[in-house]
Image: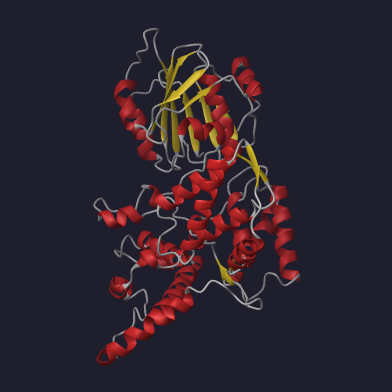
């Protein structure tokens, strides 16, 4: 039996790379929370975390029992007989065709493979462009390269089939094509996607976290509370759900927030938030390289780590790539070339899609010209805040724009100090360059940031960072594009 007392001793014989994704995520959460076994204090930090770890350990013990791992080798004298039976049992667990009356396995998160299979099924009967097919292929290949989909997956054959079919379609199609799946293929893949189903509580938890700390969320909170109550009344959410206790806590907090006029934002306590993010399988901030990661790691362990990215789309993906949630960027160029328009547009995109944004406009101040840029780009949003000074407390914001660094009187060491004070925040530093393209202090600082964007001429932005070398966009085209 694997417990928190013997965890790191018992798991030495378990190859986590071939385990189901839910168990891999649970193991990563244990590594992060315990700081690779140094301390189990996080286990008792909140009831939610304790419950989540207990559920993970139960699932791990169940898996270990089925596969002969994690238990004492009491029957070592009959190893030959057991060695023949173990593979047979393992084959049964990988069987993917389920009888119609079988109930799906309820999970916290669908495996990456099933999400791609669902996406492939949804193509049936649809007309798609060559670019859309290529995006699907690229996202699938990215998941394979990043080992989110592995060769040992029970769905490896289906993923390979999908990849090959899409490549064939892309190579032979013209501008557009209507995709038609063979009935047998459609039936087989649909049956696979029905083998696992996300718990009802998981969707509610995701939505609950999404309104945390954001203004103007009263109506969303009321709607979420009503939908949770409706799911309970109709029996879709009941005591068999492993997170029913958390759901009752969510209901209580949502009701308090919805009915108390004095409460402007819903604030989730940090311990509770960590526990909920753990349930969802979030790597959270520690796996983004913020804290809790040892200074020296085995390359095998590091290669298997999963880093969260923001999920950029559209022109920002084209320009920047897909950075992690605590990126740093610098933007520079000559005056009147469009830097501020670019930054205001970027700030609006981040506010609409990724969190709270503070735009410190020391260069222009809270003046008509800044208002004009906000209106031209149509980026006003409850998550976007503007300021003429740098506040002493930046903790309420996820992304901070400093326009400009020189007007704020900040040296490179000041910028590094800000990053050190707020390691989970993203900073976008804007520099003014002189007519000959030089800028004081930033030449050395640009080596310390993840993203470097230059505006070398009016209306043109070029990116030279580490996420997408050579990305380029036009600043004044498609003003309201996401």
**Left or right of 386 in this view: 423:** left
Task: Tell me where residue 154 appears, x and y as whole percent.
Answer: 47, 67
> Would you place residue 67 above or below residue 38 in this image?
below
Please state the horizontal and vertical placement of residue 29, each as a whole percent of the image. Answer: 41, 61
Left or right placement of residue 225 versus residue 35 in this view? right
Q: Which quadrant of the figure has residue 121?
A: bottom right
The relative height of residue 51 versus residue 137 in the rendered view (above or below) is below
Q: Colour scheme of this structure image?
A: secondary structure
Q: Quadrant of the C terminus?
A: top right
Q: Position of residue 159 (x, y in %)?
A: 50, 58
Decide: is 10 above or below 150. Answer: below
Using the rendered image of the protein, determine whether residue 278 is visible from the camera's viewpoint.
yes
Residue 293 horizontal side relative to residue 188, left or right: left
Residue 208 visible at all: no
**Rendering quarter of residue 120:** bottom right
Locate residue 221, reporting x and y percent: 69, 52
Quarter in which the N terminus is drawn: bottom left
Q: Nearer the viewer, residue 70 or 359?
A: 70
Q: Count numbered badges in the picture.
A: 0
């Amino acid at each position: 039996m694997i417990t928190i007392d013997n965890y790191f001793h018992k798991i030495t014989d378990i190859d986590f790379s071939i385990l189901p994704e839910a168990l891999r995520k649970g193991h990563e959460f244990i590594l992060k929370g315990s700081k690779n076994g140094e301390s189990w204090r996080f286990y008792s930090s909140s009831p939610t975390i304790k419950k989540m770890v207990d559920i993970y350990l139960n699932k791990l013990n169940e898996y270990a029992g089925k596969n002969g791992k994690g238990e004492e080798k009491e029957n070592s004298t009959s190893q030959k007989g057991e060695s023949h039976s173990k593979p047979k049992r393992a084959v049964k667990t990988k069987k993917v065709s389920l009888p119609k009356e079988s109930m799906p396995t309820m999970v916290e998160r669908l495996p990456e493979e099933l999400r791609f299979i669902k996406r492939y099924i949804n193509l049936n009967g649809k007309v798609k462009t060559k670019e859309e097919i290529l995006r699907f292929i690229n996202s699938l290949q990215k998941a394979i390269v990043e080992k989110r989909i592995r060769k040992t997956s029970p769905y490896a054959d289906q993923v390979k089939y999908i990849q090959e079919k899409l490549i064939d379609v892309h190579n032979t199609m013209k501008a557009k094509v209507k995709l038609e799946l063979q009935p047998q293929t459609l039936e087989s893949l649909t049956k696979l996607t029905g083998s696992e189903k996300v718990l009802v509580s998981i969707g509610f938890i995701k939505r609950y976290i999404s309104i945390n700390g954001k203004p103007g969320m009263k109506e969303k909170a009321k709607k979420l509370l009503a939908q949770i109550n409706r799911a309970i009344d109709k029996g879709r959410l009941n005591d068999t759900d492993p997170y029913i206790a958390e759901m009752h806590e969510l209901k209580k907090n949502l009701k308090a927030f919805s009915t108390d006029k004095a409460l402007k934002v819903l604030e989730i306590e940090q311990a509770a938030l960590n526990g909920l993010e753990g349930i969802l399988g979030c790597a959270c901030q520690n796996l983004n390289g913020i804290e809790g990661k040892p200074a020296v790691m085995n390359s095998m362990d590091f290669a298997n780590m999963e880093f969260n990215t923001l999920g950029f789309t559209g022109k920002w993906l084209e320009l920047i790539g897909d950075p992690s949630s605590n990126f740093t960027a610098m933007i520079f160029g000559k005056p009147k070339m469009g830097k501020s328009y670019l930054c205001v547009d970027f700030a609006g995109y981040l506010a609409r899609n990724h969190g709270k944004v503070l735009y410190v406009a020391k260069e222009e101040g809270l003046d008509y010209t800044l208002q004009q840029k906000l209106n031209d780009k149509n980026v006003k949003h409850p998550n976007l805040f503007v300021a003429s000074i740098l506040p002493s407390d930046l903790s309420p914001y996820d992304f901070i724009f400093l326009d400009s660094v020189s007007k704020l009187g900040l040296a490179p060491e000041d910028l590094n100090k800000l990053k050190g004070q707020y390691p989970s925040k993203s900073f976008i530093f804007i520099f003014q360059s002189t007519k000959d393209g030089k800028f004081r202090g930033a030449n050395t600082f640009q080596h310390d940031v993840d993203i470097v964007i230059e505006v070398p001429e009016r209306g043109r932005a070029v990116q030279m960072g580490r996420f997408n070398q050579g990305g380029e966009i036009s600043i004044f085209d498609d003003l309201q594009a996401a």
